[in-house]
Amino acid sequence: SANIGGVATLTGTPPNLVYAGALPVLFPNAPPVSFATWFMFSCPLAIIMLGFNLALLASSFCPPRAGAAAGARAGEMLQLEMRSLGKVKFAEAMVMAHLAVLVILWFTRSGAGGWTAGFPRPEFITDG
């Protein structure tokens, strides 16, 4: 799962950031790599890898002979665990809100009407 997430996002693994930083140095005429452009390129690959891994795990740990009873037990166990967590706490809600804002800022940083255009030196704000 770490490899899937690492491929899917620009900040997922250090080699992705090295690539984003080295690309304009090695190829000055190449279009810049932003978080959004990286995600558009790598999201289909991550979805394919996720589907393959889910199929592999399902065939390994949930064989067809287990039947519907095993699936029902798993669902009941998940519901029990969800109930034991309780309500979302204020601190947890704040973390979720900050994560949502961060992701929105990542995707809207560059391009036409990106929020970096409002800064005097937008070239200082990069994804890498």
Image (cartoon, grey):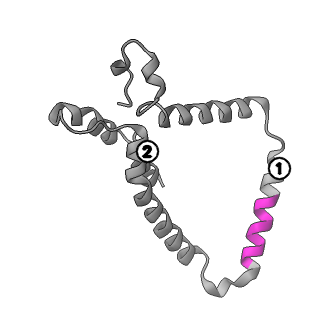
**Residue type at tag 1:** Ser
Whole-angstrom CA distance, mark 1 to mark 2, is 32 Å
Segment colored magenta: 70-79
Question: Is residue 39 inside the magenta stretch?
Answer: no
Displayed quadrant of residue 86: top right
In terms of sequence position, does the residue under pointer 1 or pointer 2 come before the other? Answer: 2
Disc 2 designates what residue?
A: 9
In front of the other: label 1 or label 2?
2
Of 113 and 66, the residue lying toward us? 113
Badge 2 amino acid: Thr
> Which of the 4 image quarters holds residue 14?
top left
Q: Is residue 6 left or right of residue 88?
A: left
Is residue 8 left or right of 93 when viewed as pictured?
left
Residue 18 visible in image: yes
Residue that numbered label 1 is attached to: 84
Res 12 visible: no
Residue 96 percent location from the top left of the image: 67, 36
Secondary element at image label 1: helix
Residue 71, percent across and down?
72, 75
Rendered residue at 35%/30% (across/down): 128
For mark 2, does the 10 Å Cα neighbourhood hold few (<14), some (14 to 19), or many (20 or more) residues? many
Residue 100 place in picture, x, y as percent: 61, 36
Residue in the image at 46% along x and 50% along y: 5
Query: Few, some or many C-alpha atoms within 10 Å of disc 1 (few <14, some 14-19, many ≥20)?
Result: few
- Residue 65 drawn above or below residue 108: below
